[in-house]
Amino acid sequence: MGQGELVNAFKEDVEVLRGVPIFASVDAAKLKLLAFASQRLVFDEGQTLCKEGERGEQAYVIVKGEADVFVRAGEYDIRVASVGRNDFVGDIAILCDTPRTATVRATSRCETLAIGKAQLMGLLRSFPEMSIAIMRVLASRLERTNHALAEAQRLAKAH
Amino acid sequence: MEASLFRYIWQQTRREQLWILFVILASMPFNYVMLDLPKYIVNGPIQAKGFERATDTQHYFQVKIPVPSSISEQGFLEVLHGWDLNRIWSLSVLSAAFLALVIINGLFKFYINTYKGRLGERMLQQLRYDLVDRVLRFPPSEHRRVKPAEIATMIKDEVEPLGGFIGDAFVQPVFLGGQIITALIFILTQNFMLGLIALALLAVQGVVIPRLRRKQLVLGRQRQLTSRSLAGRIGEIIDDMPNILTNDVSNYHRADIANRLTTIFGIRFALYQWKFFVKFLNNLLAQITPFLFYMVGGLLAIGGHLNIGQLVAVISAYKDLPSPVKDLIDWDQQRLDVEVKYTQVIEQFSVDPSLELLPPSDFDGPVPHLSGDIVASGLTVIDTASSRLLDNLSLAIKLSEFTAIDGNATSGGETLIEVLARLVSPDAGRVLLAGRDLRDWPTAVTGRRISFVGAEPFFAQSTITDALLYGLRHKVLRPSEGSQRHKIIKSGSNSLDFEADWVDYEAAGATGPEDINERLQATLQVVDLEAEVVGFGLNRTLAEPTSEQEQAFVEARASFRQKLEETGTVHLIEPFDPERYNVQASIGENLIFGMPINEAYELRRLGSNTEMRKILADLRLDDTLFGMGRAIASTIMELFEGLEADNPLFEQLSLMTPEQFPDYQAALKRVGSKPLRNAIPGDQAIFLDLAFNYIEPRDRLGLLDDALIGKLVLARKAFHQALGDEQDKIAFFHPDVYIVAASVKDNVLMGRVAFGIAEAEYRIGVLLHEVIEERGLRPAVFEAGLSFNIGSGGKRLTGSQRQKLAMARALLRRPDFLLVHRGLSQLDVHGQTAILDRILGLGKPEDGGQGFGVLWNLENPQLADHFDRIVHMEDGRVVSDDHHHLDDREDASERQEALKIPA
């Protein structure tokens, strides 16, 4: 039983993490560490991964299956997105230390890799270059949101 | 208590002291004869005095009693004629007599020492008992004054030396004094002059030495006080640990302790210096006497005023003098020492003369029920900072009424409740309870008919059952058989049989130990604690499961399985199957496959367990597992390289702690690529244990393959075969066998909860409760939960659980009146309302039940609506008094019902 086989068993978790944009540029050794320090967590159809307004201690990378994202508007939950493999959900709450901004509910059996807030923060503290990679991704996400907002405003005026 | 130690001892042990004195006097003739007999042996048979011819005999052992000549002409009565013995027989008989005397004297000494020791020990325990008895009778105002640790050290340590002294207290001075006086009289009759010298020096010794020792006593007292306050301080530090941590003041406390220890050292050192100086002086005086005898006596002899024989006799008589004198001085020293200790201790246990000690709780016959009113008039309570907690308060409450007190923390509501609970005595005014002054009621009535619940209940370390039954243990109701130990301690009229059954089951509405659990369950349901107790029970083992219960649990496994299937959650549990490897359990758990009973078979010792090692070696598994442990260690070392030990990433690491990293690194270096047999035994165990802890779904290193799994199951079977069927070392898992050593929960699951499934524990918990309920096992589980240890001060419970438990305890004995001061403050308003409603429901006299009244200092004004009457208080005064429905409670509940409808 050699070292090679050990790493193989990790391969899937590490590959999944690499497929997540914010981890894409993080080097392999650190991804392996993050994978090791994370847990596999399976949600059955209908179970919630995170609930809007609650405090969250974990973020989830979806390995298999799908989930819907809902945002509460008045008395109704409005579905705003669907997520699947390699999507990272619940990251805002643990990166910004705020309550959950949306509810995520599994629409099929959903295998995830759960990353603890303390673990992610610990990794960022030890490897600052990882923070830079994450900052880039978040900045581009913001830029995209700004574009979307501008587009929405333009459409609203047009009406 | 007696202010003087001697009076206390005399009072308690007069008879024993006189008896021991008598025994000592009775032993003296034997002692004298034993000293005298050698002379006869040497002079008679050995030196042949009176046996000059071979046929000579001597007459021995004639016993005569002298009587007046009117009775007998000879002037005596012969009791024993005695025998004529020749030389050899004389020697034999006299030697035998000597031996007999040695034995008799030895037995006397044995008896006297045992008796004195027993006497002292018994008195010591009696004194301790009396001290604790006194503490128990302290009026409430004294409770705040005393420091627990100081009281404990006084009762435990400071009175200890008294035990050794009590046996000698009277006997020793009489005995030693007698010896000294005898020797002195002998010397005086030989030569008056020399006698005076001896007397004078003794006087000096007897006067000067005790005076010098007075300073020693002062130091001794200081030492006692400083040591005691040290004990008190240490007690406070322990109680204050959280504050010390949150304020970072540990160094301040270190300095404080160091300072106190230095002071104690100084006192002790001064004590030693003085003690040995006095000893030196004492020895000097003792040695000067013979010098004077030689000098003065010699001069007298030379001058012809004293013959040599007398001088020798005097000097030899004096030889016997120093040792009793020294013993007497030692006795005196000890006396002073223990007297100081006694006074010091007694001072702490006496209260202000203006305060009365509580009467002992002796009450014969049935305790009457209370009915009528509580009338407080002109109540004033002033605290130590002279602020008025209660200010001339007058209030009348019906004992059948539900009254709420509403007000803030300074309203005086708390103080009023405490006055009524007799925890605070008013500085002015009085309380009439059912027409009689509250102070005049025996505590047996108020302490059994009125229940009090404070905001911060305290519990001694005990089980939940004992915490609940605490309020029912007033006196022995069913004597135990046999135990007589309590008779050593004199205790007034109380029976102190601790082993007896003290629980007043009837007060709780039960008939005996058989049905008390039902009452406990009902009462815990009132306070919403019953489900939590069942929850405790799930994680506990059943103490003595019956075979029906065992059977029921085994059957419950199948029901549980069925529920998993019905809900489509079979994947939550991986059941234990003797034929299969359980991937959700560690390799070690799979090998043992049971609950270790014997320590040597515990999981953490498996790597060095010889039986297991032999089986692994036979299957060639040991090398594989050793290599696996090494691979795990090196992988983890590589992954975590460069991380600091406090990094949160380590929290997810179950196989080792960051502190162990250097050990593993060193072991990896030592072992290199050596096979198992070339590694030292310590390293073998390290890596084997690491492999034993491995759980595939948790650690995800992909180390298990089918071949290995097959071999591990083989090893398990071989191991079980090697241990045999007795199961005294390990209780093996089996789907059809109840495991006594395992918890209730584990017995139902008979498997492992799978890793990595969201909310698995919660989902299993729901099904588990259902199965327990359906199978009729809830009472058994509840009973197991009752034996949960609540920890010192009840700290293993949450704050709200403690409050609920205290409330349950107060309700269990079905009081006539319930006093509550913010007793549910740690619960949310929803919980408070639900529990309050149930308590008030109990309070209504229905179905022949007695019912009870309530006075509740509210934690939450929202609760006020539930009461008949609301008293608003501010600054120790009543500001308004709202009677909802004073007489007609039915109306009240109807009105509440009516109010609920529109909502």
Image (spheres, coloured by chain):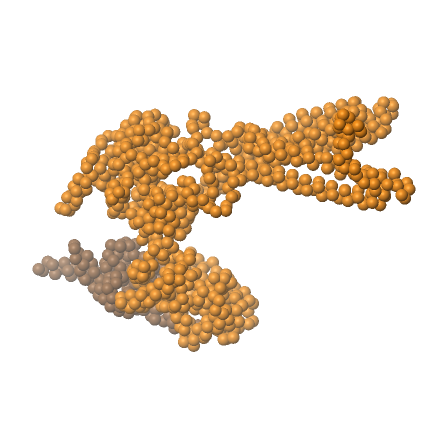
Chain colours: A brown, B orange
Name the one closer to the observer, B321 or B444. Answer: B444
Q: Number of marks in the image?
A: 0
Q: Residue at x 37, y 64 (%)?
A: B551
Identify the residue at image location x=30%, y=47%: B527
Q: Give the percent coordinates (x, y) of residue A153.
A: 14, 58
**Looking at the picture, does residue B93 appear above or below residue B196?**
below
Image quarter of residue A8:
bottom left
- In depth, the one of B578 and A60 nearer the eye is B578
Q: Nearer the viewer, residue B274 or B533?
A: B533
Taking the image as shown, residue B539 lies to the left or right of residue B111, namely left
> Can you tell which quarter of the image residue B27 is in?
top right
Q: Residue furthest right?
A: B53
Expressed as whole percent of the image width and height from the top left, the position of residue B588 reads 45, 67
Horizontal relation, residue B588 to residue B172: left or right: left
Identify which residue is drawn at 33% across, 48% down.
B519
Viewer can see residue A66: no
Residue A81 position in % (x across, y down): 20, 64
Asked if residue B847 can be seen in this view, the reply is yes
Using the image, determine if residue B526 lies above or below residue B723.
above
Residue B121, quarter of picture: top right
Which residue appears farthest toward the left when viewing the image? A159
Residue B48 vs residue B146, the one in the foreground: B48
Looking at the image, is B846 positioned above or below residue A154?
A: above
Q: Locate residue B885, reporting x and y percent.
A: 19, 36
Residue at the extreme bottom of the image, as rendered: B707
Q: Residue at (48%, 39%) from the top-left corner?
A: B149
